[in-house]
Image (cartoon, rainbow, N blue to C red):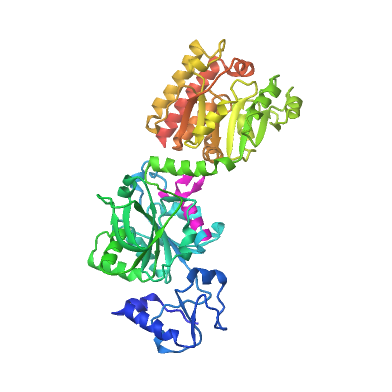
């Protein structure tokens, strides 16, 4: 079998007629074989390749017929589709998130978005070879992805040193690797529950390129991306950032292209040395008579180009999987809380948790009681006795997707967990505040000077990290919920051993540009163990000192 590059065809003056004429003649030849027709005994094409390329390629077996010259053919060992991810741009619109991190590595709940794109290519499109065009902060992408073995693909890197030419230039740079049909997906777009697998069954073989788009009900989304007009599955026009909207179809960054597209891009750059917009180039080709197909995407799509769109992409992913996320409750105990069984029963009644843990010091009078009440015990080693170090020890041993922290003496109402979960879809961590007076139980010590002190510390954090847009009225509330990915991101920056660990978690999230939301929660007059251990002037100064140390350290960075 032989493989011929599409470059041969692109050099023909009337190559489309040549193609149609040659195929017509070839169909009459006994050596002709078309995928999906297994009549030829010498051809051994996998069923998956037949399904993917049914009716689009020609296999030539042991035949010297001259009409085969210039025909794109593919052997059974040739890669069916290649992938191409342009990832050279600076991501200027996503600043400050992309000041020191490449936009492709912005994570969606712990997974860099570029890895999610690779997963779609691998699982939905059967792609195993992917070209990634890198430029700005490209070494970060290479360190993260390596050669692709971890993701079960082969990655090939190309460096784009001419970012001013736009990402059409990145597509052209991939030419040295790609000589067959390929799928382009942009690294800053998030897809959830998409139907990319349907591209393999779509009739794109008769077109120079296929654009994937989806129906939206917000015209502003189309204005920020590009508009598609189509008729009977064929593209009529592609308008980048249109002023006038004529339908509800928004274009996405998914394209399936013939390798012949490289010749057109080369020609465009020969005529225009400056930047070329890829979508506008495709529209010019449509208007010049080239054929383009339309594929309608399903699922949820987000173009990640600023803070709000990043938060939206994370929200959609969290909301989709929330019911199936494993949830754990971690109850902090000083070791002498006699009401531990009552606390466990109240939280278990919510039926919100898959696992309930109690973290205890190595010497505790309630260990048996907590175990009999059905909790899993995490017993700290000798010497690990303070609030922060015990929680850090426990959190390193919990693998749940979502973790809720609370106290063993039932200082917080179990019904407030539902409130934490409601906001957690929109945040990386949700913390309670004990300073809403209507929710503070009568007789509680969270009043007067104590309440003012916590509020003052919360406002100090809010002011010193003003650009993070957080709002705090409490720094010592131990009722909070966060994602496992949040803990993984902030854990290396947590060093406080005592009660200041609670505010250190908040600050670490802000430093990592994670979203922290504060909500009012009920606070009961039960926290005797915690009050005895930590409600004193020493704790206040510990909080204050840590806040200033973290802020000055951030300035140094």
Which of the two residues, 295 or 262, is positioned nearer the viewer here? 295
Residue 107 lies in magenta, yes or no? yes
Residue lying at the far front of the rendered structure: 232
Magenta span covers which residues?
Answer: 102-123
Which of the two residues, 546 or 470, is positioned nearer the viewer here? 470
Query: Which residue: 38% across, 75% down?
Result: 6
Residue 435: percent from left, percent from top: 49, 18
The quarter of the picture where residue 389 lies is: top right
For the C terminus, the image quarter is top left
Query: Which residue: 67% across, 29% down?
Result: 358
Query: Which residue: 49% across, 72% down?
Result: 54
Residue 2: percent from left, percent from top: 47, 81
Q: What secondary structure characterizes most of the magenta part?
A: helix
Residue 205: percent from left, percent from top: 41, 70
Query: Which residue: 31% across, 45% down?
Result: 220
237 horizontally vs 99: left or right: left
143 horizontally vs 377: left or right: left
Which of the two residues, 34 or 113, is positioned nearer the viewer here? 34
Residue 345: percent from left, percent from top: 68, 26
Which of the two residues, 508 or 2, is positioned nearer the viewer here? 2
Residue 293 lies in magenta, yes or no? no
The quarter of the picture where residue 461 lies is: top left
Q: Is residue 178 above or below residue 376?
A: below
Say if residue 424 shows up in the picture: yes
Q: How many marks?
A: 0
């Amino acid at each position: 079998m032989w493989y011929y590059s599409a470059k041969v065809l692109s050099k023909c003056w009337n190559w489309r007629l040549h193609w149609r004429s040659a195929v017509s003649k070839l169909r009459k030849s006994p050596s002709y074989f078309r995928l999906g027709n297994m009549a030829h005994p010498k051809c051994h094409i996998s069923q998956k390749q037949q399904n993917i390329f049914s009716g689009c390629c020609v296999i030539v077996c042991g035949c010297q017929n001259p009409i085969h010259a210039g025909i794109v053919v593919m052997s059974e060992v040739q890669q069916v589709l290649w992938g191409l991810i342009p990832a050279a741009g600076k991501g200027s619109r996503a600043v400050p998130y992309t000041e020191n991190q490449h936009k492709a590595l912005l994570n969606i709940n712990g997974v860099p978005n570029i890895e999610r794109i690779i997963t779609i290519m691998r699982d939905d499109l059967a792609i195993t070879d992917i070209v990634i065009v890198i430029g700005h902060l490209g070494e970060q992408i290479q360190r993260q992805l390596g050669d692709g073995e971890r993701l079960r693909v082969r990655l090939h890197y190309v460096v784009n040193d001419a970012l001013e030419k736009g990402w059409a230039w990145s597509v052209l740079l991939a030419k040295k690797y790609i000589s067959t049909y390929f799928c382009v997906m942009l690294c800053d777009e998030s897809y959830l529950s998409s139907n990319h697998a349907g591209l393999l069954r779509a009739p794109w073989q008769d077109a120079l390129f296929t654009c994937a788009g989806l129906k939206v009900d917000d015209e502003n989304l189309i204005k920020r991306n590009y508009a598609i007009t189509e008729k009977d599955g064929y593209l009529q026009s592609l308008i980048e950032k249109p002023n006038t909207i004529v339908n509800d179809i928004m274009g996405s960054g998914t394209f399936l292209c013939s390798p012949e597209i490289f010749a057109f891009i080369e020609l465009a750059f020969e005529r225009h040395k400056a930047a070329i917009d890829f979508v506008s180039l495709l529209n010019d080709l449509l208007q010049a008579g080239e054929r383009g197909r339309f594929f309608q995407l399903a699922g949820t799509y987000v173009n990640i180009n600023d803070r709000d769109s990043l938060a939206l992409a994370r929200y959609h992913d969290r909301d989709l999987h929330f019911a199936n996320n494993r949830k754990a409750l971690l109850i902090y105990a000083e070791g002498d809380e006699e009401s531990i069984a009552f606390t466990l029963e109240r939280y278990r009644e919510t039926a919100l948790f898959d696992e309930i843990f109690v973290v205890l010091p190595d010497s505790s009078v309630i260990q048996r009681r907590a175990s009999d009440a059905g909790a899993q015990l995490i017993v700290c080693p000798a010497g690990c006795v303070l609030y922060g170090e015990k929680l850090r020890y426990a959190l390193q041993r919990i693998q749940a997707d979502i973790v809720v922290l609370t106290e063993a003496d039932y200082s917080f109402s179990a019904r407030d967990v539902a409130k934490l979960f409601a906001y957690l879809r929109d945040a990386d961590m949700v913390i309670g505040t004990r300073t809403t007076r209507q929710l503070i139980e009568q007789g509680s010590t969270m009043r007067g000077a104590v309440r003012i002190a916590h509020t003052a510390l919360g406002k100090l954090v809010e002011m010193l990290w003003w650009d993070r847009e957080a709002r705090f009225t409490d720094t010592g509330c131990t009722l909070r919920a966060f994602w496992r990915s949040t803990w993984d991101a902030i854990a290396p920056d947590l060093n406080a051993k005592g009660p200041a660990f609670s505010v250190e978690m908040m600050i670490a999230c802000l430093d990592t540009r994670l979203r922290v939301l504060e909500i009012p929660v009920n606070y009961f007059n039960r926290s005797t163990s915690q009050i005895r251990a930590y409600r004193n002037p020493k704790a206040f100064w510990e909080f204050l000192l840590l806040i200033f140390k973290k802020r000055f350290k951030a300035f140094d960075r």
